[in-house]
Image (cartoon, grey):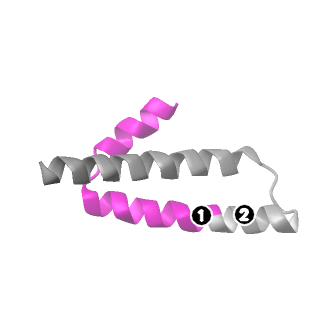
Amino acid sequence: MATKRLKELKNLTSDELATKLRETEANLFQTRMKMATGQLSDTASLWRLRKDIARMKTLKGQGAAKGSK
């Protein structure tokens, strides 16, 4: 499952990746608020969102490293 998401993220342009990253971070914030108020039923979604954000930041960093060479 993670490799499928990674392949999808690799196909995005840097602008699309930045937009997706902002959306995912906002979604993580909303999910954390639901967790704090007891409205969250799927607690694993926090873990998945954090891992997706890490993947996006890694790809963004790799793209910056390629651009500087």
Which amino acid does the dot numbered 1 rest on?
Asn
Residue at disc 2, secondary structure: helix
Q: How far from the left and from the top, in percent, is residue 66?
A: 18, 47
* Residue drawn where x is 36% and y is 63% of the image: 18
Residue 21 is left or right of residue 61, and the answer is right
Under mark 2, the amino acid is Arg
- Please check the rendered image and state whether residue 8 is part of the magenta-colored stretch, yes or no: yes
View extreme (right): residue: 38
* Circle on res. 44: none
- Residue plotted at (80% across, 57% down): 40
Residue at left 28%, top 63%? Answer: 15
Foreground of the two, 53 or 1: 53
**Badge 2: how crowded within 10 Å, few (<14), some, or many (20+)?**
some
Left or right of 62 in this view: 43: right
Q: Secondary structure at mark 1?
A: helix
Q: Nearer the viewer, mark 1 or mark 2?
A: 2
Alpha carbon distance from label 1 to label 2 = 9 Å
Q: Is residue 9 left or right of residue 28?
A: left
Mark 2 lies on residue: 32
Q: Quadrant of residue 14?
A: bottom left
Q: Is residue 4 above or below residue 29?
A: above
The range drawn in magenta is 1-28
Disc number for residue 27: 1
- Is 49 or 65 nearer to us in this picture? 65
At a point 36% along the width and 36% down the height, the residue shown is 7
The quarter of the displayed image where residue 27 is located: bottom right
Which of the marked residues, 1 or 2, is nearer the chain's N terminus?
A: 1
Q: Do the numbered discs 1 and 2 sit on residues whose CB atoms are within 8 Å?
A: no
